């Protein structure tokens, strides 16, 4: 009887083990990695070679991301400076011959715990104006989650071509679409994350002389209670007309100027709930178009002088302001910005606007 009971226990135990093994085999193994793919475009500024002008860069980037916050990436980019050649026919930049950059690099990418920001370093092949070389790059970036799959990618990258000989340095700021196969976004994550703001204000060379009207549109994405990502577009235009007479000599001057900025960056809220003070920093492209006609006359003899300049700069914007909650999802913003182009003249701006959060 005891032997029969022993064999029954053994038989039941073997059956339970086999059943557990079958159930385990039917459970899909949890993957420890996922992939990202993004396409971005933006502006590139030379730092130490050829020209101070800007070019247009197109990027394709793929990465395999491990769950422990690091991964491998491959980045391919093409930078075209022909737009600089065609448009910068100005006194500041002489006409240039066409040239372009191409690079393909691979390296390590390190992510924040929530995988929303990253830093990376890569090494690979560079072709600068036909010269083949080894180069390296360093990048910082982040993404704005729109859904489980799609995000808006914003990143900056410093490239160092011909690193073993005479290095060429150039820096770019890019934005585009990121696709991922990692699905973890909850509906609450998207609540009040995305906002749009419309501003009006004035800009000028000095704080006490803000004479040119300006209009600004801004897209922001809330990372947390303290920080938001920003994308900003500014447009301003002015018209001046002057006339001088001195005896038989006269001068008439008509000047039309247009300014526009396309920048991206970060806003940091220092305090408050319904009244929040903030600091912000952005970088991007600054365009200044000037058309000036001067007519001089002396004893009924007229001379005409025409200046048509289009300058493109890479630069920075630093700002400070306050955001005041009006009603749910609607806030008012007052802010002061300082515009600092790398090669152009700095200027200031005061703005007020309304912000709507989705």
Image (cartoon, rainbow, N blue to C red):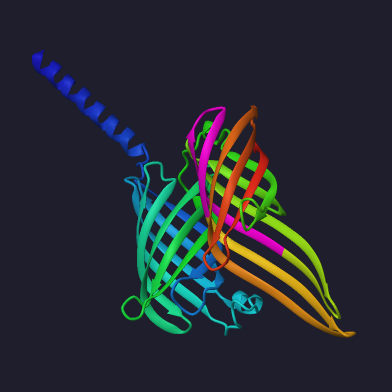
Residue drawn where x is 66% and y is 53% of the image:
209
| Frontmost residue, 15 versus 157 | 157
| Frontmost residue, 331 versus 3 | 331
Residue 274 in magenta stretch: yes
| Frontmost residue, 215 versus 139 | 215
- The quadrant of the image that shows the N terminus is top left
Check the image and name the residue furthest to the top: 1
Q: Position of residue 150 (x, y in %)?
A: 54, 48
Lateral position of residue 31 relative to residue 100, left or right: left
Residue drawn where x is 58% and y is 83% of the image:
96
Residue 56 in magenta stretch: no
Lateral position of residue 302 relative to residue 199, left or right: right
Residue drawn where x is 52% and y is 74% of the image:
52
Residue bounds of the magenta highlight: 258-282
Q: Main secondary structure of the magenta part?
A: strand
Check the image and name the residue furthest to the front: 247
Q: Position of residue 193 (x, y in %)?
A: 56, 37
Lateral position of residue 341 relative to residue 167, left or right: right
């Amino acid at each position: 009887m005891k032997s029969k009971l022993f064999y029954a226990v053994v038989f039941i135990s073997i059956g339970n083990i086999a059943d557990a093994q079958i159930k385990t085999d039917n459970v899909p193994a949890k993957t420890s990695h996922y992939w990202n793919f993004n396409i971005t475009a933006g502006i590139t500024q030379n730092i130490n070679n050829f020209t101070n002008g800007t070019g247009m860069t197109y990027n394709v980037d793929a990465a395999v991301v491990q769950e422990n916050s690091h991964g491998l990436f491959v980045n391919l980019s093409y930078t075209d400076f022909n737009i600089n050649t065609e448009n910068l026919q100005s006194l500041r930049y002489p006409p240039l011959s066409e040239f372009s950059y191409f690079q393909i690099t691979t390296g390590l990418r390190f992510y924040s715990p929530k995988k929303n920001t990253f830093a990376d370093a890569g090494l690979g092949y560079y072709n600068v104006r036909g010269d083949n070389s080894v180069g390296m790059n360093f990048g910082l970036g982040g993404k704005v989650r729109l859904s489980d799959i799609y995000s808006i990618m914003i990143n900056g990258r410093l490239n160092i071509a011909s690193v073993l000989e005479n290095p060429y340095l150039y820096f770019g700021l890019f934005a585009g679409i990121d696709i991922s196969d990692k699905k973890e976004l909850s509906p609450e994550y998207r609540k009040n994350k995305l906002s749009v703001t419309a501003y009006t204000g004035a800009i000028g060379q000095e704080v006490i002389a803000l004479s040119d009207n300006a209009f600004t549109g801004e897209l922001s994405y809330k990372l947390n209670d303290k920080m938001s990502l920003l994308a900003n577009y500014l447009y301003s235009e002015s018209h001046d007309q002057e006339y001088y007479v001195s005896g038989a000599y006269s001068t008439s001057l008509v000047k039309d100027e247009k300014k526009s900025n396309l920048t991206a960056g970060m806003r940091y809220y220092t305090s408050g709930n319904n009244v929040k003070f903030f600091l912000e920093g952005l970088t991007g492209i600054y365009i200044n178009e000037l058309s000036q006609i001067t007519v001089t006359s002396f004893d009924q003899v007229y001379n005409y002088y025409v200046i048509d300049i289009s300058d493109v700069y890479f630069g920075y914007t630093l700002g400070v302001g306050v955001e005041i909650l009006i009603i749910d999802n609607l806030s008012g913003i007052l802010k002061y910005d300082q515009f600092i182009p790398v090669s152009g003249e700095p200027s200031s701006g005061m703005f007020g606007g309304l912000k709507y959060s989705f």
